[in-house]
Amino acid sequence: MFPGDADFESGVVLPLQVEIYYDHAVVEINFDLQFLKFFQMKNYCLYFLLIFLAACNGQNKTDLPKNSASEPKKNAGWQPEFKIQDNDPYFIETKEITSQFGPSNITRSILQDKNGNIWFASWEGIIRYDGKTFTNFTNKAGLRRYHVFSILEDRAGNLWFGTIGAGAYRFDGNTFTNFTTKNGLVNDLIDCISEDKNGNIWFGTESGASCFDGQIFRNFTKKEGLTDEGVHSIVADKTGKIWLGTWDGAFIYDGNTFSIFKNKAGEPFRNVRSIIEDKNGNIWIGSQDGLCRFDGKVFTNFSTDFVGFVFEDKKGNIWISRGDSKRNMMVLQCLDVDFLTSGKSKFTQNKAESRQVFGITEDKNGNIWFGTENCANRFDGKTFTDFLEK
């Protein structure tokens, strides 16, 4: 997925301005999403880089910030006539470190840590909510100005943040450590993060997957058998297998080889955006083909509309973000556990339409949190709170 595109996941086709990222370069091009899908499938990032180099020929030099952790390595060979500033020009800059208001732009992922703090991966950076105050850690810690896309808390209590262009950050409660391609990460555009049963951290990127054992990165690309390198979802199941969601389908890695996971009709799933394993060991897939559950033998389809996010709450209810291409909207819906066990009911719509619904999660009090294209939301079962300044 290309990071500036909030509509691409839901399959909405609209003319728009798209940001194409290649390492630290950014190209801004206007075209519709059908065109973008074609180039995503073909991974023509190099093509756009060449456009960028041609367009920038002759521009003035721009020095990078004097930060050894951020400066690119100097090559002995040919050098272009310019340097690329180490930030995302589309980053939503805010001046405040603390505020009584939450993020007011795209909020991509939300997580509650072991201490009860709520963390947001947003276009404004890394933000924490302690129940009273929102703190922007990107501003507080002076982190690189890139969109933040994903969050994970590992079993040791470290927080991991995936960015679009700046690699991954690990936060141990005191210090942020930045991991990039210089450290062995396969790509600095990170869509998703997961932890396997051995404590390895997995990163789904736009160039494949990376597995970090605490010392080194092991990368998985087409060379290792992953035929689609744009990984949008990644999860380890109870047996130790790694599931990866891509545009071309869902893949399973058994520790040795990758295999494509096909649907009931024997076809690959299209545009897989979310894969989870529920408490009972069922695999749920949200994709362009809708919502599907696989219990190890039987496939059950619950929707044929696009499904972007899938989340299981403590009660066993399945929450999804579901697309409505006719109205260019998405809705937050809940597949009630009573239906899953007895067939009493099906989907309940809990939120009026929004352009996008991202990063569904649950806090310790049973509140459901989710992000949209302009804020973070909390749903207590009756009331929605968006934490925006009125």
Image: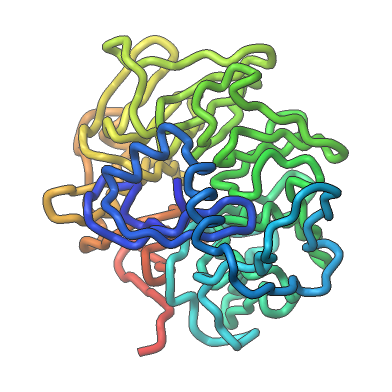
Residue 2 picture location, percent across and down: 45, 50
Image position, residue 290 (x, y; %): 27, 34
Colour scheme of the picture: rainbow
Residue at the (21%, 32%) spot, across then down? 304
Q: What percent of the width, then of the height, locates residue 144?
A: 69, 68
| Image position of 43 (left or right of 350) | right
Q: Nearer the viewer, residue 117 or 251?
A: 251
Q: Residue at x 49, y 27 (%)?
A: 228
Percent position of residue 349, x then y? 22, 53
Quarter of the image that includes the N terminus: top left
| Left or right: 318 as drawn, with respect to 26 | left
Residue 200 visible: yes
Q: Residue furthest front?
A: 58
Instruction: Look at the image and tell me whether residue 361 can be seen.
Output: no
Residue 115 location, quadrant:
bottom right
Q: Residue at x 30, y 66 (%)?
A: 382
Camera-side residue of 201 and 296? 201
Residue at horizontal 74 percent and vertical 46 percent from the top: 181
Image quadrant of residue 132?
bottom right
On screen, residue 214 versus residue 247, left or right, reads: right
Q: Measured along the vertical axis of the image, is residue 369 above or below residue 195?
A: below
- In this picture, is 367 found above or below 386? above
Quarter of the rendering occupied by the C terminus = bottom left
